[in-house]
Image: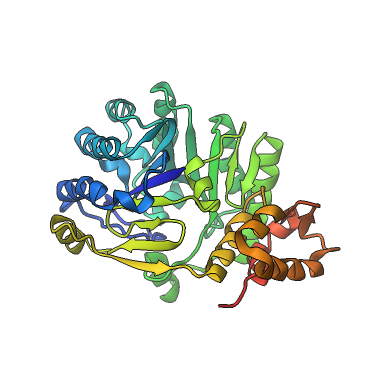
């Protein structure tokens, strides 16, 4: 089992909180699509002959693609890989890009899951996030996607926004319930380096996020999702009826994946690779059949630390049999030794076969997870 990630590095404008590699431009748009299609056969051996269970278009803003762009990439993927008949094929979309015509084109090109970047249904908050849509358009985009046959929908929201309140956050959540969204990804606002938010805070033009606000709104979120039939299956992700995001779940379980496009990351089970984050250098490398990327081979301890970090973030937790099978006596022994101090704590749920974060533990997950890390 493996996945494919395609990075489309273009946006209409840059959101104030975003530090992903993307450009508020459409220069080289066609050329980058052509290069991604060429990269596919050049890099396909990285994940071998694995059956592809998930394909994910991220960015940037993949919904800026036209039908011919999407068709070119999907044709190349299907020509070079064996794709599962029930593969999850996700495309990230901004509400203002969606139309009946574009949604029809997505359907015709095998997209079966949409990830819509709402972030908030509050117009004031959307404005200072520098989003390109308003709340009315956000709601319309969800309704339009449903009318076009996209029932497998996920929505992104951000909590802990400056000037937000428990009431404004509650209104966001009520709209999620009213719109019957089956999957929800919610992230605390993080002020990343080299973003507009970081600049505004440094200049005193915006107050920094408050930890108490994060915690209160995260607690609201957990209560709301539990009361409305969602499974809290990863710290930031919630779904109904077992509709887990298969692509991201494969990441958390260490499955191999191929990343295509500028800045995209790949993993073959033992090493990580990342493409150069530069349009022209990326295109030149592909044109010469010499993709420009860096590589990091993972040590056993590095793989163990990633295993701990990703598995403990999920409600499946860490299975002791998997831990011992993958990492042997030394590292599993180290883990069990660290686990002793949590025997009577309330932050971990420990059974005979597994350990996972409790509700209380989720709120201090970073501290708990790092406590199990092995030093290189």
Q: How many marks?
A: 0
**Of 205 and 340, which appears nearest the observer?**
340
- Is 73 positioned to the left or the right of 242 in the image? left
Residue located farthest toward the right when viewing the structure as drawn:
344
- Residue 372 at what x, y percent from top left? 67, 69
**Of 200 and 255, which appears nearest the observer?**
255
Answer above or below: position of 305 versus 90: below
Answer above or below: position of 285 versus 3: below
Residue located farthest toward the bottom when viewing the structure as drawn:
376
Answer above or below: position of 234 versus 54: below
Question: Does the rendering let one see residue 60?
Answer: no
- Residue 123 at what x, y percent from top left? 44, 46
Answer above or below: position of 227 versus 125: above
- Is 193 positioned to the left or the right of 28 in the image? right
- Is 11 positioned to the left or the right of 31 in the image? right
- Residue 57 at what x, y percent from top left? 35, 44
Which residue sits at x=57%, y=51%?
236
Question: Does the rendering let one see residue 280?
Answer: yes
**Of 85 and 346, which appears nearest the observer?**
85
Which residue sits at x=48%, y=31%?
152
- Residue 197 at what x, y percent from top left? 42, 65
Which residue sits at x=81%, y=60%?
346
- Which corner quadrant of the image does residue 231 belong to? top right
Colouring method of the image: rainbow
- Which corner quadrant of the image does residue 111 belong to? top left
Which residue sits at x=27%, y=26%?
101
Q: Quadrant of the C terminus?
A: bottom right
């Amino acid at each position: 089992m493996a996945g494919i990630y395609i990075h489309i590095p273009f946006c209409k404008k840059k959101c104030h909180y975003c530090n992903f590699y993307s450009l508020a431009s459409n220069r080289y748009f066609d050329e980058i699509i052509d290069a991604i299609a060429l990269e596919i056969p050049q890099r396909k051996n990285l994940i071998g002959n694995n059956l592809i269970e998930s394909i994910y278009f991220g960015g940037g803003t993949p919904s800026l693609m036209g039908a011919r762009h999407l068709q070119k990439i999907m044709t190349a993927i299907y020509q070079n890989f064996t794709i599962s008949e029930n593969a999850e094929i996700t495309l990230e979309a901004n509400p203002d890009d969606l139309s009946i015509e574009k949604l029809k084109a997505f359907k015709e090109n095998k997209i079966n899951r949409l990830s819509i970047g709402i972030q908030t249904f509050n117009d004031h908050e959307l404005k200072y996030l520098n989003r390109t849509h308003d709340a009315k358009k956000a709601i319309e985009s969800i309704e339009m996607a449903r009318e076009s046959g996209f029932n497998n929908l996920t929505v992104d929201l951000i909590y802990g926004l400056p000037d937000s309140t428990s009431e404004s956050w509650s209104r966001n959540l009520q709209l999620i319930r009213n719109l019957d969204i089956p999957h929800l990804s919610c992230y605390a606002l993080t002020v990343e380096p080299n973003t507009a938010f970081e600049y505004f805070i440094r200049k005193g033009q915006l107050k920094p996020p408050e930890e108490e606000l994060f915690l209160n709104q995260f607690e609201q979120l957990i209560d709301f999702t539990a009361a409305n039939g969602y499974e809290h299956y990863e710290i930031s992700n919630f779904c109904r009826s077992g509709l887990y995001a298969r692509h991201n779940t494969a990441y958390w379980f260490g499955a191999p994946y191929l990343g295509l496009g500028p800045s995209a990351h790949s993993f073959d089970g033992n090493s990580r690779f990342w493409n150069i984050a530069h349009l022209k250098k990326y295109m030149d490398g592909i044109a010469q059949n010499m993709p420009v990327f860096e590589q990091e081979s993972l040590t056993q301890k590095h793989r163990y630390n990633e295993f701990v970090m990703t598995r403990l973030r999920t409600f499946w937790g860490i299975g002791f049999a998997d831990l011992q099978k993958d990492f042997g006596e030394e590292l599993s022994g180290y883990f069990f030794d660290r686990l002793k101090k949590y025997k009577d704590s309330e932050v971990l749920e420990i059974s005979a076969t597994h350990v996972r974060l409790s509700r209380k533990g989720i709120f201090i997950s970073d501290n708990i997870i790092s406590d199990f890390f092995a030093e290189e």
